[in-house]
Image (cartoon, grey):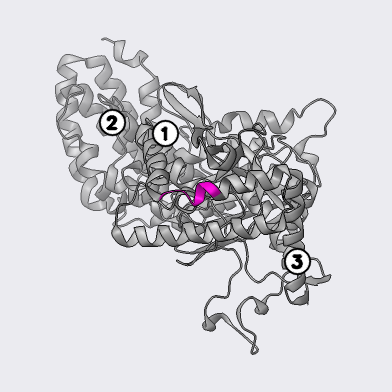
């Protein structure tokens, strides 16, 4: 079903209208005069500003569609290839063993150009252009190496250097103009004939995707852009070891897929993996992927031309998603009522293989309603007087990672949060466990952050509370559903204990001032949330000392704080010896709610006798 859905996407968006050419990014072109004279290597990248940084954009043009290369004896491509094949050198590598490989690659490329030359009649523009390329390839190695080294040394950034050695370089015959060789009419005809001959030589089988009989794909296109994978990419379908074979079948005979279907589903996948997708005729398409972790990405699409931009907004500014769901463009029905088929595929890269972590097929309206409900369940009161709401998906995932580094996040956590948001499922207990564990390790931050790091810790804790609330609401662990902000009627012991900790922390700060080296929260939060009976008697004794000091300096504030403490402790009959994971989550919510309520209410501090 995955491959059929991707095949349908490629057909619907006309990604495979030309089966012999594929849209590819190019960074340079090689301009040649008659007989290979006056060779020039020209950069095609353009610069633009994104805030304070400069971004390089590469043009996308149709290039010959080829099977992905693999292994050290990889074949050369047709008239368009990377630097090591055109020049016999990759200037970023100086290993002598690599030099031998580069020379072999250059010879394979030259052999392929000679084969094309033999098929073109003399006296034509196409033959003259290919003659010029062949003359350049047969010129002295020193001249060719000097050209590519000069271009590499003159580039101003590491990214430009990477483009030069890794992206395809096409050839232009200067007397003709700026048309790439592989676009010249006779060469296009030759390439299509070669592709047809290649298909005719392949075995015939019934395709598992389309159900039709035709040439079977021997190898599948490598997918580039799957995070965590090799730069050369990896296939989605592969049977490269005997352990994967069954019923006496070898290799990809275990899953016979037609050449057309294999190229179509790969085109669909590469379109979804691309952050700036477009069709072969240059028409821009909507981005439809979300990065969930350093090695995991979620792809999503609809069977119809449905606007799914609101799913991207979920990652950046979720507070606006509800408005987008309810206020569609003029003349279109609401996404909440769209019955179109919806698909999402979660992929990870690992060595030379692409891993399918999850696949979901449903309807767009179901996803929209589930996301709307998720935004309600994950809504939380936020610090710094920001209105209550939901944090961006990427901020939620960072809050679960050590040091807020998304590369340290377990790939399954990002997948689980994403799938829970779009499917309406309960958040797995692993998400709640990760939020509690990270809070115990990092602490909940200070209500008065005095540094950027402290500010980030406070925001990360609030984001974790958002996930904790969504987890508890969907698990329905407690009779009283956790609220967005302070719930003074909630008498659950864990919630009350969290409130008490926030209150004694505020009393300490009021008595000793904001610059306390190690607050009660810094020292006791972890043990207070897991073994309250061992900690809270000590905390309450400390609070009495601080209240005594506060009565002498700010008597009115002392009265307000003492009343609040009595209100929170009044519902506690006994301090629990231990608290389970769900209770620790409710403790975190109680602490967060109470701290935000104290932080927002400045009026009590002015009370006097």
On screen, 411 above or below 379?
below
Query: How many neighbours does mark 3 have within 10 angstroms: few (below 14), some (14-19), or many (20 or more)?
Result: few
Q: Is residue 402 magenta?
A: no
Front-most of 242 and 584?
Answer: 242
What residue did someone put label 3 on? 197
In the drawing, does residue 217 fall left or right of residue 476?
A: right
Q: Nearer the viewer, mark 2 or mark 1?
A: 2
| Outermost residue toward the bottom in this view | 248
Residue 478 image point, x, y percent: 51, 51
Q: Residues within 10 Å of mark 1 (few under 14, many from 20)?
A: many
Which of the numbered marks, if any, corresponds to residue 593?
A: 1
- The residue that appears at 52% across and 83% down in the rendered structure is 243
238 or 328, which lies in front? 238
Foreground: disc 3 or disc 1: 3
Q: Is residue 467 above or below residue 228?
A: above
Badge 2 is on which residue? 454
Label 2–label 3 contact, CB within 8 A: no
Residue 139 highlighted magenta (yes or no):
yes
> Please, what secondary structure does the residue beneath circle 3 have?
helix
């Amino acid at each position: 079903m995955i491959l059929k859905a991707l095949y349908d996407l490629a057909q619907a968006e006309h990604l495979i209208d030309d089966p012999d050419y594929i849209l590819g990014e190019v960074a340079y072109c090689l301009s040649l005069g008659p007989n290979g004279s006056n060779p020039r290597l020209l950069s095609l990248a353009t610069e633009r500003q994104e805030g304070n940084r400069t971004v390089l954009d590469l043009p996308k043009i149709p290039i010959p569609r080829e099977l992905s290369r693999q292994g050290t004896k990889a074949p050369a491509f047709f008239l368009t290839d990377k630097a090591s094949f055109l020049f016999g050198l990759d200037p970023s590598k100086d290993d002598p063993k690599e030099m031998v490989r580069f020379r072999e690659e250059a010879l394979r490329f030259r052999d392929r150009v000679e084969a094309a030359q033999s098929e073109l009649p003399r006296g034509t523009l196409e033959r003259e252009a290919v003659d010029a390329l062949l003359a350049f390839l047969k010129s002295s190695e020193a001249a060719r190496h000097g050209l590519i080294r000069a271009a590499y040394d003159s580039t101003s950034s590491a990214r430009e250097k990477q483009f030069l050695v890794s992206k395809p370089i096409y050839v232009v015959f200067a007397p003709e103009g700026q048309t790439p060789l592989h676009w010249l009419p006779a060469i296009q005809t030759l390439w299509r004939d070669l592709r047809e001959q290649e298909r005719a030589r392949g075995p015939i089988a019934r395709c598992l995707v389309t159900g039709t009989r035709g040439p079977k794909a021997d190898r599948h296109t490598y997918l580039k852009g799957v995070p965590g994978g090799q730069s050369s990419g990896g296939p989605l379908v592969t049977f490269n070891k005997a352990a994967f074979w069954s019923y006496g079948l070898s290799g990809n005979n275990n899953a016979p897929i037609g050449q057309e279907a294999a190229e179509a589903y790969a085109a669909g996948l590469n379109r979804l993996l691309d952050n700036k997708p477009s069709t072969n005729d240059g028409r821009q398409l909507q981005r439809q992927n979300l990065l969930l972790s350093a090695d995991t990405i979620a792809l999503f699409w609809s069977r119809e031309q449905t606007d799914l931009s609101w799913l991207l907004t979920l990652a950046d500014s979720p507070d606006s998603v509800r408005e987008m769901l309810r206020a569609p463009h003029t003349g279109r029905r609401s996404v909440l009522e769209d019955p179109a088929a919806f698909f999402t595929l979660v992929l990870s890269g690992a060595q030379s293989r692409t891993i399918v972590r999850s696949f979901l097929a449903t309807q767009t309206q179901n996803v929209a309603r589930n996301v709307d409900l998720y935004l309600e369940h994950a809504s939380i009161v936020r610090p710094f007087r920001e209105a209550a709401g939901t944090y961006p998906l990427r901020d939620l995932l960072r809050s679960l990672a050590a040091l807020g580094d998304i590369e340290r996040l377990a790939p399954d956590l990002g997948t689980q949060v994403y799938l829970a948001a779009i499917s309406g499922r309960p958040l797995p207990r692993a998400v709640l466990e990760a939020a509690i564990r990270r809070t115990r390790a990092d602490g909940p931050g200070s209500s008065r952050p005095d540094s950027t790091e402290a500010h980030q810790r406070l925001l990360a804790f609030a984001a974790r509370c958002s996930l904790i609330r969504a987890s508890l609401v969907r698990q329905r662990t407690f009779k009283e559903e956790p609220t967005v902000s302070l719930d003074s009627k909630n008498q659950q012991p864990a919630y009350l204990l969290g409130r008490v900790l926030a209150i004694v922390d505020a009393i300490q700060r009021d008595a000793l001032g904001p610059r306390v080296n190690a607050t009660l929260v810094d020292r006791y939060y972890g043990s207070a949330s897991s073994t309250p009976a061992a900690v809270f008697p000590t905390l309450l004794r400390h609070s009495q000392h601080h209240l005594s000091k506060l009565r002498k300096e700010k008597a009115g504030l002392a009265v307000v704080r003492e009343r609040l403490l009595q209100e929170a402790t009044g519902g506690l009959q006994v301090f629990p010896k231990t608290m389970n994971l769900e209770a620790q989550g409710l403790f975190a919510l109680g602490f967060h709610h109470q701290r935000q309520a104290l932080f927002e209410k400045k009026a009590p501090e002015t009370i006097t006798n």
